[in-house]
């Protein structure tokens, strides 16, 4: 092989190696860029999560910080119904003050309790600050009652002593009862004073002991139960386990009870609010409406719809009231008009009755009766005209003027009479 061929071969090999090296570098750069992007993605999602958390909290986001979903049927439900807990509260025994035999019996009972366990348990101890405010207020009310009884007995004793109708033995007996009441009142007052002083100087602590019993629905295996059936099965199973624990602990002299839903809420409240519980207890939190922090306001459109419904109902009521009042007023007007024409209607009906009974009464008597009715009608018409026009008596300025006024007034009256007669004739013919 010549030198030229050798150099050309080496050149081609070198060029091929350069291309391969360049290709490998490109692959390395591509993989590195891809890994950097993957590392940046979780950082961005974390930043988004922190931004949403700082923007505002809702009910679901707050519950994410808690290790339970809800409290229902004396159970704590965790992990979306995959774990149920029931809690048994136990009263502790003073082991140090027991004798040797008593200590041995307690230890044997506790061993028996451990040997009978067929399921996992958790022992939980909670230290609480005893709130003496309620106890002190209760005692103060009782002391006030004792003071009232003491004052009544003192007044009764003084009245008996002043009356002079009681013997010395009776007065001594009454004084003895009075002294007992006074001692009881003073003792109660001293107890309250010392308790208040003790509670202000230092905290009174109390330890509570609990046994937590879990249940996992996955122990049922493959099943087609719905959530309600699983909850019922969990409750029955936990209740059986809790009663078994209470019975075996009774051999140690320890009394236990299953916590209800309210006591479970108090237990969790104290566990999550160690510092605030001493000042702001659960009863005060419930009275202040702490659950309103998690309630959401109704939709604006729903509120507007309710307001519109209220306005429609109110306007409909007003329209109905106006229509009723107007109907009443129209009926009242008709009644008043009928009252005004009542005399005419009565006279017309009376004439009609006379006309119908003319054969029995006689024509002469019937005509006289009709004339009599007409005369009474004319008199009533004159009285009505006088009331309406308020005709005043003539002034005494001269005979001629007075006579002319009388003739004018008489003419007016006669004209009115004629008008009344014509109207009656027309109504009669009608």
Image: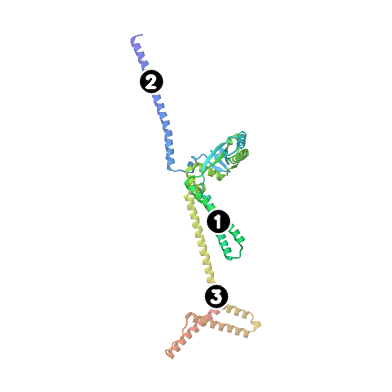
Does the CB distance between marks 1 and 2 fall below 8 Å?
no
Find numbered disc 1 in the image and state the secondary structure of the residue it sits on. Answer: helix
Mark identifier at residue 236: none
Does the CB distance between marks 3 and 1 fall below 8 Å?
no
Q: Nearer the viewer, mark 2 or mark 3?
A: 2
Query: Badge 3: how crowded within 10 Å, few (<14), some, or many (20+)?
Result: few
Nearest the eye: 267 or 354: 267
In the image, what residue occupies the spot 58% across and 65% down?
Answer: 163
Find numbered disc 2 in the image and state the secondary structure of the residue it sits on. Answer: helix
The residue that mark 1 highlights is: 182
Q: CA distance from mark 3 to mark 1?
A: 85 Å
Q: CA distance from mark 2 to mark 3?
A: 125 Å
Q: Earlier in the sequence, mark 3 or mark 1?
A: 1
In the image, what residue occupies the spot 42% across and 31% down?
Answer: 39
The residue that mark 3 highlights is: 339
Q: CA distance from mark 1 to mark 2?
A: 108 Å
> Looking at the picture, how far across and down is residue 160, in whole percent?
58, 63
The residue that mark 2 highlights is: 21
Residue projecting furthest to the bottom:
399
Which quadrant: the C terminus?
A: bottom right
Q: Earlier in the sequence, mark 2 or mark 3?
A: 2
> Looking at the picture, how far across and down is residue 319, in whole percent?
50, 62
Examine the rendering and report whether any part of residue 3 can be seen: yes
Examine the rendering and report whether any part of residue 118 can be seen: no
> Looking at the picture, how far across and down is residue 75, in whole percent?
57, 41
Give the vertical position of 25 relative to 259 (above or below).
Answer: above
Residue projecting furthest to the front:
168
Which quadrant: the N terminus?
A: top left
In the image, what residue occupies the spot 65% across and 83% down?
Answer: 361
Residue projecting furthest to the right:
360
């Amino acid at each position: 092989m010549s030198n030229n061929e050798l150099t050309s071969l080496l050149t081609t090999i070198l060029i091929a190696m350069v291309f391969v090296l360049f290709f490998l570098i490109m692959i390395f750069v591509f993989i590195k860029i891809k890994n950097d992007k993957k590392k940046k993605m979780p950082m961005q999602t974390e930043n988004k999560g922190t931004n949403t958390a700082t923007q505002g909290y809702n009910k679901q986001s707050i519950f994410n910080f808690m290790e339970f979903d809800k409290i229902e049927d004396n159970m704590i439900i965790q992990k979306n119904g995959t774990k149920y807990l029931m809690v048994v509260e136990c009263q502790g025994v003073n082991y140090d003050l027991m004798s040797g035999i008593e200590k041995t019996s307690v230890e044997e009972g506790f061993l028996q309790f451990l040997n009978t366990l067929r399921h996992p348990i958790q022992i939980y101890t909670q230290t609480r600050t005893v709130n003496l405010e309620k106890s002190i207020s209760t005692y103060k009310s009782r002391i006030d009652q004792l003071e009232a009884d003491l004052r009544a007995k003192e007044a009764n004793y003084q009245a008996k002593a002043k009356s002079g109708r009681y013997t010395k033995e009776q007065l001594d007996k009454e004084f003895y009862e009075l002294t007992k009441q006074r001692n009881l009142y003073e003792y109660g007052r001293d107890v309250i004073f010392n308790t208040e002083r003790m509670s202000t100087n230092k905290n009174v602590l109390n330890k509570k002991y609990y046994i937590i019993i879990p249940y996992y629905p996955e122990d049922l295996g493959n099943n087609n139960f719905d959530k309600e059936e699983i909850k019922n099965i969990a409750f029955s199973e936990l209740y059986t386990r809790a009663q078994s624990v209470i019975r075996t602990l009774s051999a140690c002299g320890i009394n236990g009870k299953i916590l209800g839903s309210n006591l479970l809420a108090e237990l969790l409240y104290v566990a999550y609010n160690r510092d605030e519980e001493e000042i702001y207890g659960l009863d005060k939190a419930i009275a202040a409406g702490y659950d309103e922090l998690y309630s959401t306001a109704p939709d604006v459109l729903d509120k507007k719809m309710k307001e519109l419904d209220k306005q429609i109902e109110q306007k409909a009521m007003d329209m109905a009231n106006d229509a009723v009042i107007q109907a009443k007023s129209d009926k009242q007007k008709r009644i008043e008009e009928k009252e005004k024409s009542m005399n005419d209607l009565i006279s017309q009906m009376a004439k009609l009755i006379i006309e119908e009974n003319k054969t029995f009464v006689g024509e002469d008597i019937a005509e006289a009766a009709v004339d009599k009715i007409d005369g009474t009608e004319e008199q009533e018409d004159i009285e009505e005209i006088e009331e309406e026009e308020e005709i005043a008596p003539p002034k005494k300025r001269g005979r001629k003027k007075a006579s002319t006024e009388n003739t004018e007034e008489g003419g007016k009256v006669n004209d009115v009479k004629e008008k009344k007669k014509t109207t009656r004739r027309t109504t009669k013919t009608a």
